[in-house]
Image (tube, helix red, strand yellow):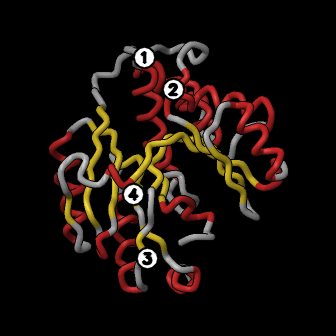
Amino acid sequence: MAGHSQFKNIMYRKGAQDKKRAKIFTRLTRELQVAAKAGDDPASNPALRSAIQAARKENMPKDNIERAIKKGAGGGDDTNFEEMRYEGYGPGGVAMIVDTLTDNRNRTASEVRSTFSKFGGNLGETNSVSFMFSRVGQIVYPAEAGSADDVLEAAIEAGAENAESTESEHEVTCAVEDFHAVREALEDKLGPAQSAQLTWKPLNTVAVDEDQAGTLLKLFNQLEDNDDVQQVSANFEIPDEVMAKLTA
């Protein structure tokens, strides 16, 4: 999948353009509620500040944002969402990590396991595949944000670990604990990011053939149709010509 910005870093996001707005808002609402549990003031809560920025980027109505924050901060929300991570293997031995926010871990585990099985994959134990990935902060800017040299310089000054540029975008990565500070420093220099998130970046990728790729994409799509799923990461790479066929 190298070279396709839609699948940058071998990962799908629930905010992908082809997803229904209702599902995007469901994901964002949960993120806001969870972040707000640590405080409803974005000035002193970086996680909430990031969640609000993500919601605004998706044109989430202000009332929806404020209602989610109020519920999360204790203003009438009796739902306790918790973060759960599932790890396993998809077709072709591809390592996969599924991050969720759920109010019923038994339901979510059952649904994720069933989806893996349906497409020839299987879930493993915790940490069974995460050693194949690095947990990083990822901030992406469009190419027009600046030259590769300018973005690299801004990334270094912001405290990032790396910056890579292609014809279509710039990707800056940083340590998880530095994510909010790096993001804000970059925004001061380059403006709002195209996307900013914590993600799992594969240390190495696995090449898959056309049949495996088709099944993997179906697996991804069904996982992402689950409201509890926030993000799916994997370490496979689809050749450009195969991706062109599958997305035609």
Q: Closer to the N terminus: mark 3 or mark 4?
A: 3
- Closer to viewer: mark 3 or mark 4: 3
Are the residues at dot 3 and dot 4 in contact (C-beta closer than 8 Å)?
A: no
Residue kind at label 2, given as amino acid type: Ala
For the C terminus, the image quarter is bottom right
Residue 172 image point, x, y percent: 65, 45
Residue kind at label 4, given as amino acid type: Glu
Are the residues at dot 2 and dot 4 in contact (C-beta closer than 8 Å)?
A: no
Circle 4 — which element? helix
Judging by the rendered image, the residue that carries numbered circle 1 is: 38
In the image, residue 28 sits, relative to residue 37, either above or below, namely below
Residue kind at label 1, given as amino acid type: Ala
Q: Residues within 10 Å of mark 2 (few under 14, many from 20)?
A: many
Circle 1 — which element? loop
Given residues 145 and 248, the one toward you in this image is: 145
Judging by the rendered image, the residue that carries numbered circle 4 is: 224
Residue 223 image point, x, y percent: 34, 59
Judging by the rendered image, the residue that carries numbered circle 2 is: 47
Residue in the picture at 54% in, 32% down: 51
24 displayed left or right of 59: left
* Disc number for residue 207: 3
Q: Closer to the N terminus: mark 2 or mark 4?
A: 2
Are the residues at dot 3 and dot 1 in contact (C-beta closer than 8 Å)?
A: no
